[in-house]
Image (spheres, helix red, strand yellow):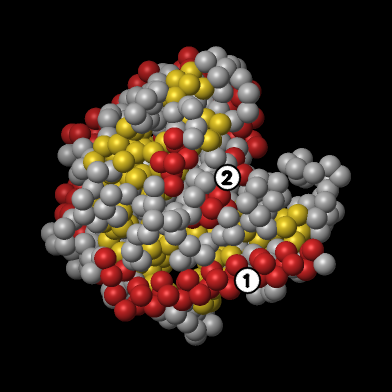
Amino acid sequence: MIDSLRPRATATPRRNLGLAITPGWAACVRAGLWLGCGGCWWWLLSAGAVARAETEAPVPPLLKGIDVDGKLHRFGEQAGHRASVLIFLATECPISNSFLPVVSSLASRYKSRGISFYGVISSPQVSRAEALRHRDEYRIPFPVLFDSSGELRRRWQPTHTPQAIVVSSAGQVLYSGRIDDRYVALGRKRDEPRTHDLDAALQAVVKGREVPQPRTEPVGCVLEDLPEGTTPPTVTFTRDIAPIIFANCAECHRPGEAAPFPLLSFSDVSRHANQIVEVIRMGYMPPWHPRPGYGVFRDRRGLSEREIALIQQWVAAGKPEGEADDLPPPPRFTTGWQLGQPDLILKMEEEFCIPASGPDIHQHFVLPTGLKHNRLVAAVEFRPGNPRVVHHASFYTDITGSARRLDRDDPQPGYGSFPGAGFDNDSSFRSWLPGMTPRRLPRGTGSLIQAHSDVVLEIHYRPTGKPETDQSTVGVFFAEASARQHVAELQVMNMDLVIPAGEKRYWHRASYTLPAAAALLDAAPHLHLLGREMKATAILPSGETRPLIWITDWDFSWQGQYLYVEPVRLPKGTRIEVDTWFDNSADNPLNPFSPPRDVAWGEQTHDEMAVCHFRYVCDTLPETRAMNNDFRAYVAQQQQRFLNRRQRALR
């Protein structure tokens, strides 16, 4: 089956998909420069118009919490997720403690049904150490969030402990109130409850129905008032700042990772405090570019306004350290391969030398796979040999020998080429960014890697001020033998693009209509230096619209790929629209031309592109073939648009 999905290898670079006029452009489009705040816009105009201001969708809250162990939990990112249950608890409330066995039983029953349980301890009088002891003493089996700053409590407004609040992935409260009615009032308790209110609410959620009684009156211990104001009167590192930094920054800011300094202790954070305030104020860190509410993605990063205010207040107050009992344990990270031992390990044959100074380097390294048969790949994990110099990495496949010839012609290890790999390739692998969590594709699916092919590893190096070397490694994880669904890649683009000089907000439209039903797995926008925004929307045959991704502050240096929490299933006939906005004015500090000049579609960085890549799967082989054939025709049409536009320019 797998062989039938792909064209056979030939002795010359493959052009069957027609993704480019030149090999370099093809490589750029196919696997690309994935490291920035790209964006895709799917709307309703025609290429070359200037977009008007549009009504923005409401921005949902960043739904997250930090547990007593210091681990960050993002609500709703689990596969198959339906709702999160927050149980507000108190360490010294007997009614709250008496309900813990009941809540633990419910958590066990609903765990496999898309319901995630979290305890929440939100009291200024309770230390983290006390909350941790309480969790262990009562053997609470689900995460217990330590709401040190009161952010969760202010957001969800509980009044008692225990109180259950059921929250959808979008932040909507589906139920708030008691767990059951065994307590009629304080001091008055039935032997057995008559109504199981939380259980009834969760049954409705699991069945996709309205909760019959979304509000009930909790009975228990009344929560004490939080301090007035948006932040507590005294902010300390151990209680308020360490949980934020450990959960949101330490993944990259630790020894052996790409960040320039660690943030694992009071000393680490206090010596960089002013810099931290600056980058979080700018929104530069933590790096995350998709706009909330336009696609639900895994590993969403970001700080809430309250977290930013806490850090600013802490620095302004002189960076007080606080009590040791409030300090969360240092974060723990998996060492070695994050996904376990790879099935195939590919390592650069020799070290590559990076000079102390000079421009960034894009070097490509040919890694022969030695495969004798076609295989489906479930995941690719990249391990930088020298994280200090590796800005990002991209992966291509080559079955033509083109990369080997380019390598032979370059005296250094590997070969230089930018943008793209220098040859036309056909790869649905993605790229690596610092802090990225490697993920396997959904079970039963995989990206094809053909027999006798080479993996071409592109690494973007940045000089550090002293000579460096690197010898990086790629781990390949094969899909299970029963996997049959082939992951392919779709690019939505319109190559008839000329951005007039001086245009501050030039709008461009691209679209593609699905010839078969498909499930989108991720989105990866790509623009160059004039790009400002990109928004992608799916318009179903019924007229319903589904937001796919929206990036409002494109950054060419931080392009990214964004994995949907759940595959976005789209029926046949769905039109995917991508709207892009460019700034070709003198006010754009990244404009490659001064004064500005007209900029057209092209492969060089000073040219422009507007492509949104999607990896997808189809349920059946006929649907996959229909997608492949139609996409080839679509790309041929785009090629013709490119040629027509170039011919018009030459007249």
View extreme (bottom): residue = 542
Q: Amino acid at mark 1?
A: Gln
Q: Which of the two labelled residues, at mark 2 and mark 1, occupies the earlier sequence position? A: 2
Image coords of residue 222 (percent x, y): 38, 46
C-alpha separation, residue under disc 2 versus residue under disc 1: 22 Å
Left or right, 638 with respect to 427, comes to right
Residue 282 higher or lower than 526, as above or below: above
Name the residue rendered at 24%, 30% in the picture. 133
Mark 1 — residue? 640
Q: Quadrant of the N terminus?
A: bottom left
Element class at badge 2: loop
Name the residue rendered at 19%, 68% in the picture. 194
Residue 211 higher or lower than 286, as above or below: below
Image coords of residue 11 (percent x, y): 39, 56
Name the residue rendered at 44%, 24% in the picture. 352
Image coords of residue 231 (percent x, y): 56, 35
- In this view, the residue in front, 579 or 636, is 636
Residue 284 seen in this snapshot:
yes
Residue 419, numbered circle: 2
Q: Amino acid at mark 2?
A: Pro
